[in-house]
Amino acid sequence: MPDSPAHFDTVVHARAALAARAGALAAFVRHSAPRVALSKHPAWLGVFNRALGHDVYAIEAIAGGCPVGFLPLAHVSSLLFGRFLVSLPYLNSNGALAHSESVRAALVSRAVKLADELGAKHLELRHEEPVPHPALNATIRSKVHMRLALPASGNVLWKGFDPKVRNAIRKGEKGAFAVAWGGAELLSPFYDVLAENMRDLGSPVYGRELFVAILEAFPGDAELCVVRAGSRPVAAALLLHGWGVTEVPTASSLKDMNPTNVNMLMYHHLLRRAVERGQGVFDFGRSTTEGSTFRFKKQWGAEPHPAAWQYAVPDGGAAGEMRPDNPKYALAIRVWQRLPVALTRRLGPLIVRGIP
């Protein structure tokens, strides 16, 4: 990015004003780096407003009528959990994007003020590298982003896998599973797998409306993968294709299908899809270092990259208290795992929309 301008203004755009700046902000994000994930796109603000009912804000630093900094924010609010200002829910990485440290600091300062104005329990910025700022008084670094540099062809991708990974994929291929790619027409089988898997994990599932909104906001760049055993959907994923980066924010397979290695088969197809689109990086998402999902992603050759979720927490508050790995939710998770899937599909969206 070019050097920071000598003078810039910091403006907060609420939802009604976002449309007028959407094009300029999208262009700013696109040219912020050689490779940019789709999760950075400002259109996510519209997705969260429409699908989850969040009030959304874009803090923009402007010089000469052009953006030199951007910070997207969602006001996550519920009677059950309270209020949080987040950049951004559901997605693994976001926060202040700017031409310089001075612009970035100005964006954070305005976000801290907005969080105070909204009465939020905390401001949460999902950065990858920490942003120096006196108001950001807590940081969580317990997780890392797992990313794989992609080759130019599927054959080279295959040859780069560990022999154990290739054998697991071959086992999955023996199951005669059918793999389908598409959009809204695959939403029902995708959601069936997701809802059952999230119940088994003990986590509330997002509503279908979120995935409808994602597919409509990013036609051609957001797509669903569904793997079937006969007519039964048994694994599914959402891929986001950005500029040189493909992300998989949501992927699930049914627990009873674990012995078939269908999940390994699906991930091979996800990786090949990214290669076919000419992408340079596949982002598996965040994992706790040396945890089970970390080891699953590492076997594909993914390498850890830093994640620094930063917080501005008023006195007496706790950063990340709503994270599902908080021990105080252990009993609730066990109870959730025993509920009928049909009930969790009804209750889950009402709960998860209030979790930052």
Image (cartoon, rainbow, N blue to C red):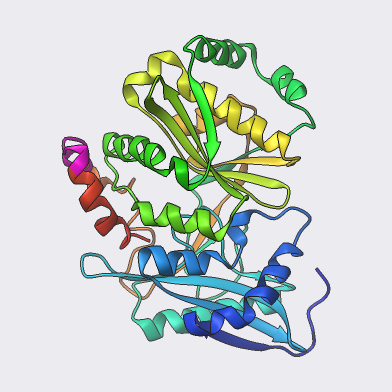
What residue is drawn where x is 27% and y is 38%? 199
Q: Quadrant of the C terminus?
A: bottom left
On screen, 178 above or below 252? above
Residue 213 can be seen in this image: yes
Say if the magenta span includes residue 45: no
**Nearest the eye: 149 or 219:** 219
Percent position of residue 175, x then y: 47, 12
In this rendering, the count of numbered labels is: 0
Residue positioned most to the right: 2
Residue 355, percent from left and from top: 33, 59
Tell me which residue sits at (16%, 40%) in the image: 335
Look at the picture and state if 23 lies above or below 334. below
Q: Which residues are magenta?
A: 333-342
Looking at the rendering, in which quadrant would you find the N terminus?
bottom right
**Residue 213 coordinates in the image, percent (x, y):** 46, 59
Residue drawn where x is 67% and y is 69% of the image? 26
Q: Is residue 249 left or right of residue 98?
A: left
Q: Is residue 55 left or right of residue 38?
A: left
The quadrant holding residue 127 is: bottom right
Magenta: main secondary structure equals helix
Does residue 339 belong to the magenta stretch? Answer: yes
**Can you say whether 8 is above or below 240 in the image?**
below
Which of the 4 image quarters holds residue 271?
top right
What residue is drawn where x is 59% and y is 87%?
11
Residue 84's spot in the image, x, y percent? 37, 70
Q: Which one is nearer the viewer's eye here, 92 or 255?
A: 255
In the rendered view, would you say 47 is above or below 331?
below
